[in-house]
Image (spheres, rainbow, N blue to C red):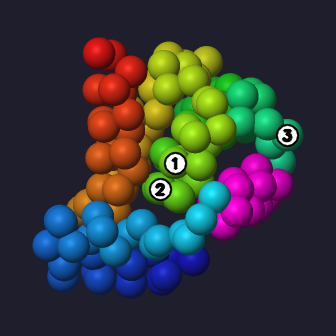
């Protein structure tokens, strides 16, 4: 897994930030594919619903357990398609984790050389729409 991550980071560094944001988010055709991707994401990460909290275990000594919602996990993992599907399904963008972190903060913290550019732009755009 580490080798794959390094390879992906190297590939992203070779592209411009705009190219990496566009290529990081594959296109799904239609609402059916988006719904299928959402259900796969929820099932894979053991969520029942887009607004269901889940306790994620951390390292006992360094990081305590944290309550995350699917929107936080999608942002942290950089899954722009799942994130957009979660937003479309009615998830609350302003919801914070038990440690007070927003999806935007999680994505920004996990971003390495533009790896989460599509997620960051999706969240920033949707937050502007919510704030207006």
Q: Where the C terminus falls, by quadrant?
A: top left
Give yes or no for residue 43 being in the magenta stretch. Answer: yes
Gap between marks 3 and 1 measured at Cα: 17 Å
How packed is label 3: few (under 14 Cα within 10 Å), some, or many (20 or more)? few
Percent x, y of residue 34: 63, 59
Q: Residue at 34%, 62% (x, y): give it.
A: 115
In this view, the residue in front, 79 or 14, is: 79
In this view, the residue in front, 115 or 128, is: 128
Q: Is residue 126 left or right of residue 95?
A: left
Q: Which residue is mark 1?
A: 84
Residue 86: quarter of image: top right
Residue 80 got which mark?
A: 2
Q: Secondary structure at mark 3?
A: loop
Q: Is residue 94 above or below residue 32?
A: above
Q: Which residues are magenta?
A: 32-44
Q: Residue at 48%, 83% (x, y): give it.
A: 3
């Amino acid at each position: 897994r580490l080798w794959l991550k390094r390879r992906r980071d190297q590939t992203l560094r070779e592209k411009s930030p705009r190219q990496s944001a566009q290529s990081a988010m594959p296109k799904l055709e239609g609402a059916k594919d988006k719904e299928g991707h959402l259900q796969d994401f929820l099932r894979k990460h053991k969520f029942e619903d887009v607004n269901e909290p889940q306790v994620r275990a951390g390292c006992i000594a360094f990081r305590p357990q944290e309550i995350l919602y699917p929107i936080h996990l999608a942002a942290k993992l950089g899954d722009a398609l799942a994130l957009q599907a979660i937003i479309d399904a009615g998830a609350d963008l302003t919801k914070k984790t038990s440690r007070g972190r927003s999806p935007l903060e999680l994505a920004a913290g996990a971003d390495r050389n533009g790896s989460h550019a599509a997620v960051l732009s999706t969240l920033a755009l949707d937050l502007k729409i919510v704030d207006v």
